[in-house]
Each structure stands twice: as structure tokens, then as C-alpha cells.
Amino acid sequence: MLDKAKNRGTPERYLRNLNVRWFQFNLDDLNEMPFLATEAERYSIAKGDVVICEGGYPGRAAVWRDSDPIYFQKALHRVRFSNPIHADWFMYYLYFQNQSGALQQHFSGTGILHFTGEALARFRLPVPPDKQIRELVALFDKVRCMSLDLRNVYENKIEKLESLKQSLLHQAFSGNL
């Protein structure tokens, strides 16, 4: 977090909860704060790292796919796997746990929920054989893409219906119906 007493180092872009979405990052609104060169290892995200929200929307996660590293604030967790295929598996597992409501058992707090580092360290990830992980992740990716396509079709239909409604209202109130 920004610390006026620390305020030394080179200004670097960094991620915060707001930037982490399920499966992706919104980089439209990045802030900068100074980081010392000695803090790079501790506060930077590299390609293949899973970034997880601690608060705000606890558990929400995405895999950093950019070759350029980026910094992150302390309200996010970084998970780095020695086997890169485990990153997507973990992200999808978190998502399914979130959708089922099971992830909430790992949160603390009453007003604002948190997925603390301690809770994350206790979180158990089932790890099937690599071949099975690759197949399942490919299937999940395919289903997610199909879901996004369907959502786009739905949103386009809603826009067209709204446009038609406005046109009909205009015609009706101008006596052209």
C-alpha cells in the first residue's frame, strides 16, 4: 500500500483488487506507486502467476499472461506454481468453489470478507495427473468461450430490442404508426 514514510523508489504500475476479474485483468485504471529495486521479487507478478483478491471480492482470480511483469498491492495474493499448467487449474478450481459457495468457508471477517494468506495457505487443491488437467482446462476454456459468445449474442439482441422499442415509441408519439 502507499506509505508516505516509505515513498522511495521508482514509480511502477501496480494491480489492486479492482483490476482483477475472473479469468482476466482490467488494466484501464492502473495506479502507480514507488517501489525499490529490492522489492521487485516480493511485489511483482510474472507470466503464469495466479493473482487472487484477498478482499473486495475475495477469491476472484486470474492468471497473468503478459511477459512484462507488474507490481501488486498487499490486498492481492500471488501464487506461483513450479508446473505452469497448475495455474489455470487452480484459477478454475477457485472459480468453481466460488460458484458453489464452498469458497466462503475460507473467508474471515463480518462486514468485509477476506481470503487471508493464512486461509489461502490452508486451502487444498486437488491435483489430478497432468494429462487430465490439460484436458479439463481445455474443456473449461472452450465452455467459457462459448459462454462469452452466448452472452455477446444476448447483449446484442437486447440492444436491438431497445433500439426497436425506441423507434416504435418515437413513431407512436409522432403519429406515424
Image (cartoon, grey):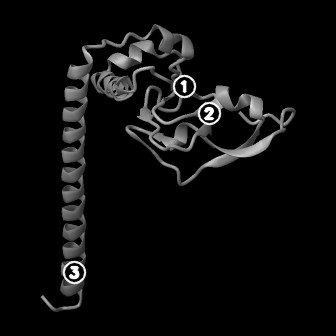
Q: Position of residue 20 (x, y in %)?
A: 48, 39
| Residue that label 3 marks | 167
> Foreground residue, 38 or 31?
38
Q: Tell me the tag on residue 77.
A: 1
Measured as percent of width and height from the top left, residue 62 is found at: 42, 35
Mark 1 or 2 closer to N-term? 2
- Point out the frontmost of discs 3 and 1: 1
Which is nearer the eye, 110 or 116?
116
Which of discs 1 and 2 lies nearer the camera? The answer is 2
Categorize mark 1 by other alpha carbons within 10 Å: few (<14), some (14-19), many (20+): many
Vertical relation: 174 (above or below) 82: below
**Quadrant assignment, res 166:** bottom left
CA separation in Å, label 3 and label 1: 49 Å
The kind of secondary structure element at disc 1 is strand
**Is residue 54 in view from this perspective?**
no
Q: State the mark number for residue 28.
A: none
Dot placed on the residue nearer the N-terminal end, 3 or 2? 2
Q: Residue furthest left?
A: 177
Which residue in the rendered view is the most extreme toward the top? 122
Q: Residues within 10 Å of mark 2 (few under 14, many from 20)?
A: some
Residue 47 visible to the viewer: yes
